[in-house]
Amino acid sequence: LGAPDRRAGVRGVLRHLGAVQLDTISVLARSHELVPYARLGAVGRKTVESAYWTDTHAFEYWSHAACILPIEEWPHFAFRRRAYRNRPHWNHQLPDGAYDQVVKQLRTEGPLTATELGGAKKTNDWWDWSGTKVAVERALMYGEVVCVERRGWKRVYDLAERAVPAALLHDDLDDTECLRRLVRLAGRSLGVGTRADIADYHRLKAEHVDAVIADSGLVPVTVAGWGKPAWADPEALATPPRGRHRTTLLSPFDSLIWERARTERIFGFTHRLEAYVPRQKRVHGYFAMPVLAGGRLVGRVDPGREGRTLVAKQVTLDGVKAAAPVAQALVEAAGWVDCTDVRVERVEAPELREPLTRELARLLG
């Protein structure tokens, strides 16, 4: 797991993955920070944000979910912008004149948050959007407005005509060409995938994948044990594996594992994000992070922080051999978020607690 060229840094990771999912949950860090961390190591969190949001390198749009996308992919989402414009109904009513007012204000004042535009909510309820918020989100989906950064987790909006480079600011690609390119990019990012894997990457419909995959440049392959047809990136097939495996904690929203069926098929590892599961029904914890080591998923950790201590609230290990890599992943993550100590609260198999704590003590010195 890593970027093809580590010298390309965070931006190289973004281009290689094609989409980095955003999410509100922040335990060690937000998910879009954890994704490059998993591949590059302890790159500074300010460096991560700067890499995404300066020099018009990326934009936020609806892909797998709300995702940071390389700016070169702007034309490829013309099919989705058109679909949104033709959508017959919405969850929020758009007040008369609000849309034009938002566009006029952005044109006059430059990049603004919804609050700066006049208010994001009518009440304290998160879903009760103001007319201004409805308008600017509608403009975002249509492509007249673009999210150019997140500031304090608030979207910062600007006019697409000003924020997107002129060479990319067009909706010239028809739907078929948009889909063909996105299928090709998803296949390249995955290396190999079934139709469902490839469709899930940018949340395309299965029939859309079927319509374009023969012309996508991906090649049909058979994967032992999968039982379903698959397609692979020919460049990945022709390139010998190189580089070293990372040992690291993974965000549950990392594209390596975000699709549960694929994660089970490749790693034999069943994972479910339990943040939205009632506490009494959680099995592995609020934000259990799988641990990657040697190309395998060897355990999971539900982390937390108390001051400068990283707390492993619940740990699951795939046997005694997993103790060393899980300890290594915990110590590196602690250093990244400026913690100086690691404390283990619960280990699912009690007999594995001693090997884990012994290895942590060795690494922490």
Image (cartoon, rainbow, N blue to C red):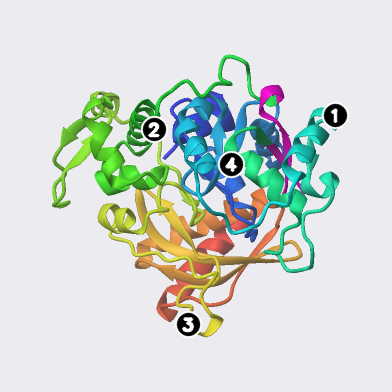
Mark 2: secondary structure:
helix
Q: CA distance from mark 3 to mark 4?
A: 36 Å
Mark 3: secondary structure:
helix
Classify mark 2: residues with Cα within 10 Å, few (<14), some (14-19) or many (20+). Answer: many
Residue kind at label 1, given as amino acid type: Thr
Classify mark 3: residues with Cα within 10 Å, few (<14), some (14-19) or many (20+). Answer: few
Residue pictured at 54% horizontal, 35% vertical:
69
Image-based side of 363 in relation to 210, left or right: right
Query: Which residue reaches farthest bottom?
Result: 280
Q: CA distance from mark 2 to mark 4?
A: 18 Å
Task: Give, as a single range, the part of the protein colored magenta.
Answer: 148-162
- The residue tagged 1 is 108
- The residue tagged 3 is 281
Disc 2 or 4, which lies upstream in sequence? 4
Residue kind at label 2, given as amino acid type: Leu
Residue kind at label 3, given as amino acid type: Lys
Q: Position of residue 274 (x, y in %)?
A: 50, 70
Residue kind at label 4, given as amino acid type: Met
Total number of numbered labels? 4
- The residue tagged 4 is 141
Front position among marks 1 and 2: 1
Query: Which residue reaches farthest top?
Result: 167
Q: Position of residue 346 (x, y in %)?
A: 53, 77
Per the image, is 116 magenta?
no
Image-based side of 6 in relation to 45, left or right: left
